[in-house]
Amino acid sequence: MLQILAIDLGTETLPALALGRERAEPGIMSRPPRPRSQSVINKDMLVRSWGWLGTVSAVLVMTGFFYVLWRAGWHPSDPTEPGSPLHHAYLTATTATFAGIVTCQVGTAIAARTDHAALRDIGFFTNPLLLAGIAFELAFTAALVYAPPLQNLFGTAALPLDVVLLISAFPPLVWGSDEIRRWARRRHHRCS
């Protein structure tokens, strides 16, 4: 429960606020205005956030969770409760899940900077507040994962290097998958 609160209050807040300071993306004035009847939250936004980015993130995070258990020799129905031989592996797997969600948030924040344009069109470094928010979120996550007093409080365990490397791939995979989706969408609109 504390890990969920850490995500909602500790890691997500600053990048979300920084996205509010994002400049308008190129070409926005050449598009027609949205109809008055269209709400701010529309079908395309929900499909992108929940259907696409959410699904990609969920698959990556679950991959990290099961990878940690698999590398410890876990099989379905093996006990993982306190006192069992696989309990530490379970703590490490839930920590990988926590860190995986945070790193997927990083990829989602980078992807959310534009709705249509490619990241290269706006530049990676043009929102320093977002980069500072991401740096804080990663440092906060590292403290929860590696500082012993916080490990005890949040129920985390130190992640081995191979798990850190796996989770480090999540931001470019999330952002890159959305970049491909936006590229296909732009191409479709040009051909229509």
Image (cartoon, rainbow, N blue to C red):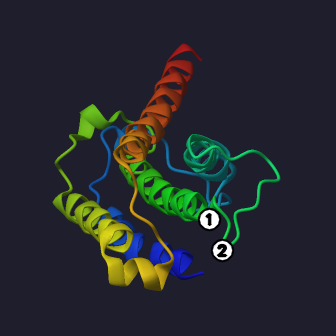
> Quarter-wise, where is residue 55 in the image?
top right
Placement of the N terminus among the 4 image quadrants: bottom right
Quarter of the image for residue 132 reads bottom left
Disc 2 is placed on an element classified as loop
- Cα distance between the residues tagged 2 and 1: 6 Å
Type of the residue with mark 1: His
Q: Are marks 2 and 1 in contact (CB under 8 Å)?
A: yes
Q: Position of residue 7 (x, y in %)?
A: 48, 72
Residue under label 1, please give it: 87
Foreground residue, 21 or 94? 94
Q: Position of residue 66 (x, y in %)?
A: 63, 46
Amino acid on which the number 2 mark rests in the picture: Pro
Task: Estimate the x, y position of residue 187 in percent, counting from the top left.
Answer: 50, 19
Q: Position of residue 147 (x, y in %)?
A: 30, 75
Image mark count: 2
Residue 82 badge: 2
Within-10-Å neighbours for mark 2: few <14, some 14–19, many 20+: few
Q: Earlier in the sequence, mark 2 or mark 1?
A: 2
- Which quarter of the picture shows residue 102? bottom left
Residue at the image position 45 percent from the left and 36 percent from the top: 173
